[in-house]
Image (cartoon, rainbow, N blue to C red):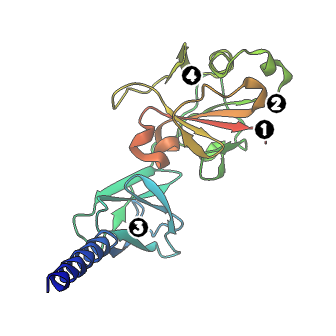
């Protein structure tokens, strides 16, 4: 009789674990439509959940449909021209977006970029003329860059618009929105916490993003983004 009671207790415990697991993995579907400030549907806007890019994009009529966990807090849409616009989910299953008017493109004095220059923003390549803010970029394949002793010295000596002190980097023109001033580092498409181990000799290019150009990374890019591509 005692063994039977123990068996019943074990079954109840396992059933509770199973139900708990099902609750954690519960999904909800969110749908909606994305318009620009002229009420024109926006195609190919990227859907972002809790500051993370998804594989979902809007169709030709601006519609999207995405499955998320019931613990998700925020949903957003990203376009190259306007950056990220977010909404709190708050148990809603239908959320529409109206994207505001994009800011005018900025061009730094005395440094007008070639409009067809290609810039890697982390989730694809676009033409520099399509960015709404400036970026700095160097081509690391230049033989002179191999003379630098470390990556920080290379950035300080060659990349415009940054302040480098030791292993600390701050992108100029950005007020820190959180603790610290360090930008987000992305190396070969992967976010990393440090670039200390990168040698100048293996660097193919370094690009600096800020403002709307960095917005696809969400709040993590509040202090800008430094994209580094290495020679593979």
Nearer to us: label 4 or label 1:
1
Q: Residues within 10 Å of mark 2 (few under 14, many from 20)?
A: some
Helix, strand or loop under label 1 = loop
Helix, strand or loop under label 4 = loop
Residue 137's place in the image compared with 39, above or below, is above
Between 113 and 144, the one lying in front of the other is 144
**Percent coordinates x, y for residue 68 in the rendering:** 37, 69
Q: Quadrant of residue 52?
A: bottom left
Nearer to us: label 2 or label 4:
2
Is residue 72 visible in the rendered image? The answer is yes
Residue 141: mark in rendering? 2
Q: Are marks 3 and 2 in contact (CB under 8 Å)?
A: no
Q: Which is nearer the N-term, disc 4 or disc 3?
A: 3
Q: Which residue is mark 3?
A: 34
Q: Which residue is mark 1?
A: 231
Q: CA distance from mark 4 to mark 1?
A: 24 Å
Nearer to us: label 3 or label 1:
1
Q: Which is nearer the N-term, disc 3 or disc 1?
A: 3
Q: CA distance from mark 1 to mark 2?
A: 9 Å
Q: Are marks 1 and 2 in contact (CB under 8 Å)?
A: yes
The N terminus sits in image quarter:
bottom left
Helix, strand or loop under label 2 = loop
Q: Which is nearer the N-term, disc 2 or disc 4?
A: 2
Helix, strand or loop under label 3 = strand
Q: Which is nearer the N-term, disc 1 or disc 2?
A: 2
Q: Which residue is mark 4?
A: 161
């Amino acid at each position: 009789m005692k063994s039977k009671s123990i068996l019943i207790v074990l079954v109840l415990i396992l059933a509770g674990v199973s139900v708990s697991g099902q609750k954690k993995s519960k999904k909800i579907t969110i749908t909606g439509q994305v318009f620009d400030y002229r009420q024109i549907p926006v195609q190919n806007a990227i859907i972002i959940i809790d500051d993370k890019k998804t594989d979902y994009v809007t169709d030709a009529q601006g519609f999207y449909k995405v499955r998320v966990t019931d613990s998700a807090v925020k949903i957003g849409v990203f376009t190259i021209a306007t950056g990220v616009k977010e909404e709190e989910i708050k148990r809603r299953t239908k959320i529409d977006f109206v994207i505001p008017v994009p800011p005018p493109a900025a061009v730094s004095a005395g440094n007008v970029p070639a409009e067809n220059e290609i810039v890697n923003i982390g989730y694809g390549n676009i033409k520099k003329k399509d960015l709404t803010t400036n970026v700095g970029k160097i081509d690391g394949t230049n033989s002179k860059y191999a003379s630098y002793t470390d990556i920080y010295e290379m950035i300080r000596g060659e990349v415009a618009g940054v302040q480098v002190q030791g292993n600390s980097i701050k992108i100029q023109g950005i007020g820190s929105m959180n603790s610290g001033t360090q930008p987000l580092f992305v190396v070969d498409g992967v976010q990393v916490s440090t670039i200390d181990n990168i040698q100048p000799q293996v660097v193919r290019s370094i690009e600096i993003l800020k403002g709307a150009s960095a917005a696809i990374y969400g709040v993590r890019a509040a202090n800008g983004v430094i994209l580094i591509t290495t020679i593979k």
